[in-house]
Amino acid sequence: DIERVMHDYITKFSLLNPLLEEKQAQLENEIFVLQTIFSLEEELKWIDQCKSQIDILTSKNSNFPPKNLFEITNINKKFIEIERLVINTHKPNIEKLIKQPKNLM
C-alpha cells in the first residue's frame, strides 16, 4: 500500500514538472523585461540630469554668455565632458537596451 501511495505521489509530481518549468520560464522572461525597463529608465534619468546641468550652465544666473576667455574655456570643458560621457557610456547602453525587447519578439 505504501508503494502505491509513493507511486501516486511521484506520478503527480512528474505531472507538475512541466507546469513548473513553464512558470519558471515565464517568470524569468518577466524579470528580463522588468530589468530592461528599469535600466532604460535609469539611463533616461541620467540623460535628464545631463540636460539639467546644461540648463544650469546656460541659465541667466550663470556666466553665460561667457565674458572672457577663461569662462569660455571652462564652459567648453564642461560641455565636452558631458558629451564624452554620453557618447562613451550611455549611448551604447541605451542602444543595447532598445535592441533587447526586439529580441523577445
Image (spheres, rainbow, N blue to C red):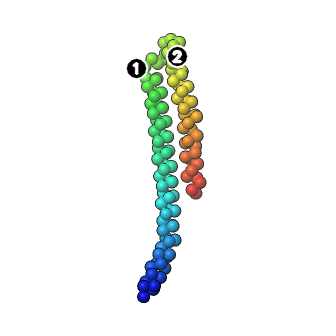
Residue 2 x, y percent position in the rendering: 42, 85
Of 22 and 55, the residue lying toward us: 22
Q: Residue at 58% x, 34% y: name it.
A: 88
Q: Nearer the viewer, mark 1 or mark 2?
A: 2
Residue 37 in the image: above or below residue 62? below
Q: Residue reaching furthest front?
A: 2
Q: Residue at 55% x, 52% y: name it.
A: 101
Of 23 and 78, the residue lying toward us: 23
Q: Residue reaching furthest left?
A: 61
The residues tagged by marks 1 and 2 sit, at their Cα atoms, a distance apart of 16 Å
Q: Residues within 10 Å of mark 2 (few under 14, many from 20)?
A: some
Q: Residue reaching furthest top?
A: 68
Q: How many marks?
A: 2
> Of the residues shown, which amino acid type is indicated by label 1?
Asn
Occupied quadrant, residue 53 = top left
Residue 39 x, y percent position in the rendering: 49, 45
Residue 8 can be seen in this image: no
- What element does badge 2 sit on? helix
**Which dot marks residue 72?**
2
Q: Residues within 10 Å of mark 1 (few under 14, many from 20)?
A: few
Residue 66 in the image: above or below residue 38? above
Residue 17 x, y percent position in the rendering: 50, 71
Q: Which residue is mark 1?
A: 61
Of 47 and 39, the residue lying toward us: 39
First in sequence, mark 1 or 2: give its number: 1
> In the rendered view, does 96 fall on the left or right side of 11?
right
Q: Residue at 53% x, 12% y: name it.
A: 69
> In the rendered view, does 93 fall on the left or right side of 45?
right
